[in-house]
Amino acid sequence: MAQKLDIDCSNGQTKLVPLTPAEQADFDARNAAAPAIEAARQTLVANYGTLQQRAQAALAKNATYLALPAPANVDVVAQVALLTRECTALIRLLLNLLDSTAGA
Amino acid sequence: MAAFTTPVKTWGAEVLSIVDINTYLRDNLQYLYDNRVTKIAESIAVGAVANINFSSIPSTYRNLYIVLQARGDTAATNAQLYVQFNGDTGNNYDSELIDGSGSAAWAGAENVAFAQMVLGIISAANAPASVAGQTRIDIANYAAAVFQKTALSRTGFKLANSTTNVQTGLAAGFWRSGAVITSILLKPSAGNFIAGTSAQLYGEM
């Protein structure tokens, strides 16, 4: 059974006491949920990093398009698709929708 | 009472008068006493503990603050720091925590009607060895039964020795009660605080 460190501020004494049944149940529930929470958090962090890398790469791609003296239709179509993905990525970052990178 | 600025006197050339003693020593000592910060209690965990609880907090101060340096044992790089007042485990807490790293500010995490306030983040088992998180929590007017209770915190933690993994955050917490705070419970979102975790409770007059 897990323990609680109780610090009595009236006399400065500390003691280790077992968790109450309710506290133990709360402790067990939090521990049971922890792996899924950590996995979800790691997904968010990874997706955040992915979107940041794509944003960095988008700067170069946009510059390449803008440097075209006379974009062909195929270039325009490709750039529209690229801009759509960039907008989706920005929306995901703006709204903190980092559970996925779909559409970005 | 305001403090007096003690005039510079040349050593050996003058003698302290009773006015000097009363004004610059007695009254300034009284000023310091009236505005003192007192360490109410502290503890350093000698083994793993699930919770740290400050109990029987005297109501003789104006504000409280907690300084916590902690590391958790859950199998993750970090754990959130949960805080409850007076043993209230109901969904009576609201809090907002934001943190950032590098040049990026992460979006905040809002917890409305939760069973605890989320007021910080601590490093955990998968963070670099011996790294702990640090959090300071300020609690204003904890002994005045007027407003519902509030808390503000600053937190810093490290997930890894690499870019974007050194982070800092700010949090605000609200307890839907105006009761005088007599106990404060700290616990990680999962697992235990490990040995060496230290917590101090201070009172400001």
Image: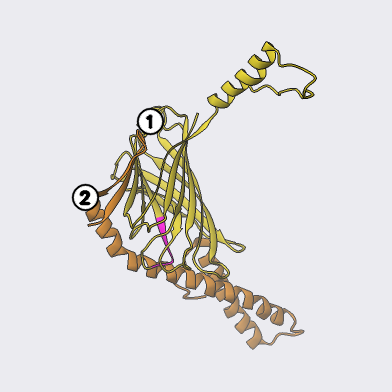
Instruction: Say which element carries label 1.
Output: loop
Instruction: Place residue B109 in its image quadrant.
Output: bottom left
Q: Which residue is mark 1?
A: B58
Instruction: Judge whether A26 appears above or below B175 on screen.
Output: below
**Could you say which is closer to the camera, residue B114 or residue B140?**
B140
Circle 2 marks a residue in which chain? Answer: A
Chain drawn orange in the picture: A
CA separation in Å, label 2 and label 1: 26 Å
Please give the range of residues in magenta: B76-80
Instruction: Say which element carries label 2.
Output: helix
**Could you say which is closer to the camera, residue B114 or residue A2?**
A2
Chain drawn yellow in the picture: B
Amino acid type indicated by mark 2: Ala
Q: Position of residue A77 (x, y in %)?
A: 61, 83
Instruction: Judge whether B141 appears above or below B91 on screen.
Output: above
Q: Which residue is mark 2?
A: A22
Instruction: Judge whether B109 appears above or below A40 on screen.
Output: above
**Could you say which is closer to the camera, residue B175 or residue A9?**
A9
The kind of secondary structure the magenta stretch mainly shows is: strand
The N terminus of chain A sits in image quarter:
bottom left
**Can see residue B157?**
yes
**Can see residue A99?**
no
Q: Are marks 2 and 1 on the same chain?
A: no
- The answer to whether residue A41 is magenta is no
Amino acid type indicated by mark 1: Pro
**Could you say which is closer to the camera, residue B48 or residue A37?**
B48
Q: Position of residue B9 (x, y in %)?
A: 77, 23
Q: Residue at x 36, y 54 (%)?
A: B46
Q: Position of residue B132 (x, y in %)?
A: 47, 59
